[in-house]
Image: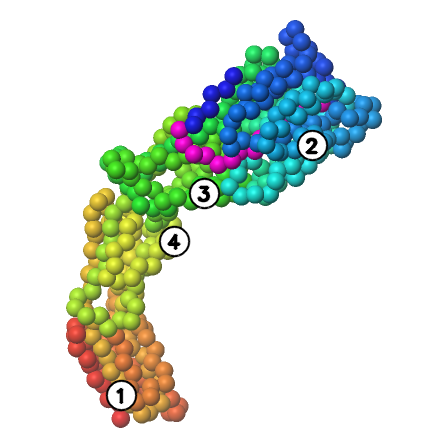
Amino acid sequence: MLAVNSYAQQPKTRILFVLDGSGSMYAKMGNDNRITVAKRLLTRLVDSLAGQTDLELALRIYGHQSQKTERNCKDTKLEVPFGPRNHQSIKDKIRDLRPKGTTLIAYSLQEAAYDFPKSTGVRNIIILITDGLEECDGDPCAVSLALQKQGVILRPFVIGLGLNSEFRTQFECVGRYFEAETENDFENVLNVVISQAINNTSAQINLMDSYGRPTETGVNMTFTDSKTGKEIANMYHTLNDRDVPDTIYMDPGYLYDIKVHTIPPVYKRKVEIIAGRHNTIAIDAPQGLLSLKIDGVTNYKNLQAIIIDKQSGEIIQVQDFNEQQKYIVNDYKVELLTLPRITQESVQVEQNKTTTLQVQQPGKLNVVTRKKLEMGIYYRHNGELELIKNIYNVNGQDITVLQPGDYKLIYKEAVVKESESTKIQDFTIRSGEMKHITIQ
């Protein structure tokens, strides 16, 4: 009935069957009724899983303890808890089940969250088997979503017995929905669901360059549940010994959002993984290098540049000088935090190439005075005089690192209350030289 891949190590899996025991399960399915078919196929399935390593099963039933007329909306019970070698106990409970009551899906899912032992590194999966909709005014969608956000369970598998496609929208918010109108449908669906729950599913992430080749690598990727935003895994992208993207193993129970931590990051959303096969996922991530250099010896303490996305205006990175950094291929605006600031409106980062921005070695201005001054350094840019730096509290001398160019030092004594006492001194800064200005 079931083929299980065993070519790769996988974590322990816990599967909780949540079985509908309401009175409607006596409805016909082919030559039998739904409960008889469910008993027969579930018993056969549990038998087939008896030898499966790293797998534990449990059984919860609802609607089976009180009559339907009582409308007992808490009629749900964990009949067989998780544990090793409990397969016979599960089969015994299935055999003795006599459907009676109402359909309480929301409350049963809520209680099912407590059925899983608290442990890490385990895949917790619910398989809900039902033939009807919620009858107890609960909200299965809200309960399912809340549990997923808490990381309690995976998105449940829902097998609808005898329900037509009109009911699909009612259950898709709860989990991955499968229809089973006949016994043959039910058997096939059980095979698919169990295969997705147990089997390893492989994938490779192809990070594509500008030429459509999967050559990009060496960046972290974050995988999150597209439905809940829950972070599932982080892993660095690598190429194997044949320079092919490495094979990873992914849980097909999720719909994934993938964030590739390039600069800026790139995304692929709502990625569906097909169970039992090798999935190839292509993400455009072409990259090139940006190198920032300064001639000679720099006197800046920590010279940096701001890298800006031209379309959004967002700052995407602050890069140190004399370093290289990879960026997604694009046209960027770069502001070099020299004095004065230098702006490059268009800097092209190209595939597998290094774009270099190089600035002149700066010089220094040394202002010497014992007077208390109001003082600023200015330069002319685009026809206007612009302030570069205010100088405060000069104690003997003040040294400012400046790019080569022509400047003005504008100042006045702080104690003098006349604006016309303002003085201007022109000066020039040359690469690697110190300019001294003494104010008596």
**Res. 179 image quadrant:** top right
Q: Which residue is tagged 2?
A: 78
Q: Which residue is tagged 1?
A: 368
Earlier residue among tags 3 and 1: 3
Earlier residue among tags 4 and 1: 4
**Kind of residue indicated by mark 1:** Val
Q: Looking at the rendering, in which quadrant would you find the C terminus?
A: bottom left
In the figure, 203 relative to 333: above or below?
Answer: above
Q: Which residue is tagged 4?
A: 314
Q: CA distance from mark 4 to mark 1?
A: 41 Å
Q: Which residue is tagged 3?
A: 233
Q: CA distance from mark 4 to mark 3?
A: 27 Å
Which element type, helix, strand or loop, lies under badge 4? loop
Tell me the mark number nearer the camera, choosing from 3 and 1. Answer: 3
**Kind of residue indicated by mark 4:** Glu
Q: CA distance from mark 2 to mark 3?
A: 31 Å
Which element type, helix, strand or loop, lies under badge 1? strand
Say whether marks 2 and 1 touch (CB < 8 Å). no
Residue that appears at 34% across and 59% down: 318
